[in-house]
Image: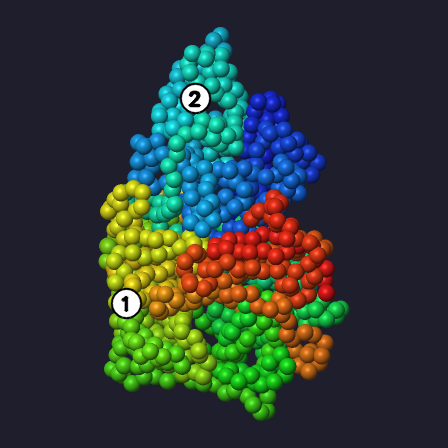
Amino acid sequence: MTVDQYYDREVQKIYDTVITEVEKDKSRKFSFAETGFLMRWVEHNQTTVSRLQKLVQNGQIELIGGGWVQNDEAAAHYVDIIDQMTLGLEHLKVLFGPNCSQPKAAWQIDPFGHSREFANLAAQMGYESLYFGRIHYVDRSLRHSTKNNEFNWIGSDEQKTSLLTGALYWDYSPPSGFCFDSGCNDEEIQDDPNQPGYNVVRRAQQFLSYVTEQASHYKTKNVILTMGMDFNYQMAEKWYRNLDKLIKYFNANPSMGLNLLYSTPACYTKAVQKAQPVLTTKSDDFFPYASAQNSYWTGYFTSRPAFKGMIRQASSLLNLGKQLSAHFLLGDDAALETAKRASGLVQHHDAVTGTAKQVVTYDYQQRLHKGMIQLETLATHAIQSATQQTTAPKHQLCLEANETTCAAIFNKASYVATVFNPLGQASNTVVEIPSYATQAAVYDYAGQPITGAQLVLAASSQANAADGAPYTLYVPLQVDPLGFRSIYVDTMAKKGALTVQKPETPLRDATSTLENSLIRLEFNVDGSLEAVVDKTTGNRQLLKQQFYFYESAGLGSQPSGAYIFRPSKQMPEIISESIQLELIRGPTVFEARQKVTDWVSQTIRLHENQTFIEFDWVVGPIPYEKLIPTGKEVISRYSTNIASAGIFYTDSNGRQVLKRTRNSYPTFPFNNTEPVAGNYYPVTNRLFLKDASTQLTVLPDRAQAASSLADGSLELMLHRRCFFDDHFGVDEALNEPGKDGRGLVVRGKHTVLLQDVKTAASTHRPLAVGVFHKPVPMFADVQDYPTYRKNYLTRFAGLIKELPASINVLSLEQRSQNTVLLRLEHIFQANEDATLSSPVTIDLKKLFARLTVTAVQELSLGANRNGPGTDSTITLKPQQIGTYLLTVQGR
């Protein structure tokens, strides 16, 4: 069901009946977790919301979690986690006031594995505890036997955050036989001895046996029982009637040794803390999660890759929209709220994961699209406000540029492209524009011709739309920090126009090279990348890149599906060893265009004066065999001579980096039942391996599953098509139809670095931020550029000067007419770089070009609690995020 259908058919009944039943008895309690559903109920029940507010104020209803959704912890980026948590907590604060609205327990009972970074973020948001349900079956067994289901989780080596964490006894279900919802058939409690079916004595003994068994695996005498399940309490009266009888019986019979009461996660946390158990600590994470020996939940790290890419793009556009609103104090709250709710919703643990049904995924995509196009309103308003004009030409996005299509400039003889830079540093970028004309003259913000631009024949791939642009225009451009610059493209210019640059085809059975001023790529006779040469040192490094696929397990007890990755063979098959190759040689962009098969193609790209390599891949439609359909899970593998000794590194939600060891887990035995899937981990924005001298780093543009199954080798799963359901709740195969029903075609990008290990972090840390928040071009129909330049800003810098390379503007958002929310983060970890891992001091009053800061209030990470600081001069240490409410005036 879609989110609307869930609310209409089930969720609103839960709020209605729970509130009514809790009001009947002050001992009754309940906990609500997701603010998104809560706000929908509030907005449709304005006349009765005071009843809910009263129950929250008196402690009968506890707010837990508090985010817009219960977010995933594998595929969700930390920026999106912070944003969706902030959105939920902000609404709770408005609804319930600053005191009652602050959740104390983070409630992550359903996500399929748990990240160290989420624990770190939750601690910085002020949570006192974290509870979850799903844990690797071997880890669960070990924790049961050692009574280590509760522990202190150290979330960060730099911040030293620590959070009391509890692994629930068995997921988050009620004790077996004690479900009292409309969909349950468990025996109800009868405590009247004069009635037939009297059973309270027997049922209480059954309940006590369960509690006693659970208590034997924990270190205190306190036992938390989750009395409910997904979408339970639509008939809350039945639940409370039966629980009341159990509680009454136990408390009337103290000799049974059980004090039973209604409670909440926060109350349980207090009881555990009061008991002062000696708890172990944990400093890694809970990936991969396996529910059984052949059921490794590592497929969802990649499932629905086009949707994952769309989520990342929507987040970047939302971030830019918030910045523009803050710079110019636009007050476009409705447009931003639409975008924030859409991006917040898709962080859900059955959304960004790719584990929803196809029809539900379409609904998510429609909501995201509606949120994304709000940026058109915000950008046009910003350009209008910058020069106090009453109108401005409408600026439009090219959301289908990945298919070489841009409706905003189709059949336009000339246009303005305004390129926005969301980074706190100046961006030296190359703008890629689908082009429909055989020539183009390009001018900068001051009306001067731009040198180095290229108009090339568009790369041929299965992603291209049938009516797509036949050419691609590349424009080198520097854009000011948190600013924008405009360029003007005239396709009818009589002089100074670029003409189409066509690719060259290498000689058959000959090696090829492609180079910029810094590095050279070497291709073998089969058209595959073979090596990289550093032209400044002459050092040649092996770097092979090839496409493979794992054949999916199909019929049987555990197929591969939306959640589960289970290859039928442990060795993948190479897709092709003979590749058609074409080359584009500069002057700004250098491309090796590969056709691997009819359903796999790629452009390997260099930029002038840059050492990174872009692998712009296109995969799909993955073949469908009508007679015996065989699922395929496609990977890109990078191979080097690096002596990595079984060790590689993955990010945690895009921030800190965790060490992984092949065939080994840090805190429990590695069970080698799934040698490939058991070594796969979630990668949100970086993956690397290294030895004493060299590091290979891969930065994907979306969340993906990844591993290192051989020394010197990294592989990332790009796309997957499975023809059987994996039996974990989706109830349909992961078989995306794509636009034409033949299967999904997806285009994405890896940014790859092969460099000195000592300086690797200085490049990959800022570059990863830039991959996420890349410059955004928007297009306006303009024929008279001199008049446009006279009436509107064509160059804008949001900062007085650019920030140090180690500092990122994580959030900049207008909160009221005269306040903005600012988050700055130090993106480096301690000891990653000799210089850039140092603390950085910034004066917030000397930061913005158009805003005068008159007051500063430090906040918690979730922006719902005041911190101690009010000084405008702040110092950020490695991995530290500073959150501030600034009182401002526009300049």
Q: Earlier in the sequence, mark 2 or mark 1?
A: 2
87 or 528: nearer the viewer: 87
Q: Is residue 448 above or below residue 168?
A: below
Task: Provide residue 95's location: percent of width, then percent of height.
Answer: 66, 40
273 or 324: nearer the viewer: 273
Residue at horizontal 63 percent and vertical 37 percent from the top: 99
Q: Amino acid at mark 1?
A: Thr
334 or 540: nearer the viewer: 540
731 or 111: nearer the viewer: 111
Q: Residues within 10 Å of mark 1 (few under 14, many from 20)?
A: many
Cα separation, mark 2 vs mark 1, equals 62 Å
494 relative to 546 in the view: left or right: right
Residue 15 falls in image quadrant: top right
SS under mark 1: loop
Task: Provide residue 729's location: percent of width, then percent of height.
Answer: 41, 43
Task: Provide residue 531's location: percent of width, then percent of height.
Answer: 29, 74
Residue at horizontal 56 percent and vertical 48 percent from the top: 861
Residue at horizontal 68 percent and vertical 65 percent from the top: 850
SS under mark 2: loop
Q: Visible in this render: residue 746?
A: no
Residue, disc 2: 187
Residue, disc 1: 640
Q: Visible in this render: residue 848?
A: yes
Q: Is residue 296 above or below residue 316?
A: above
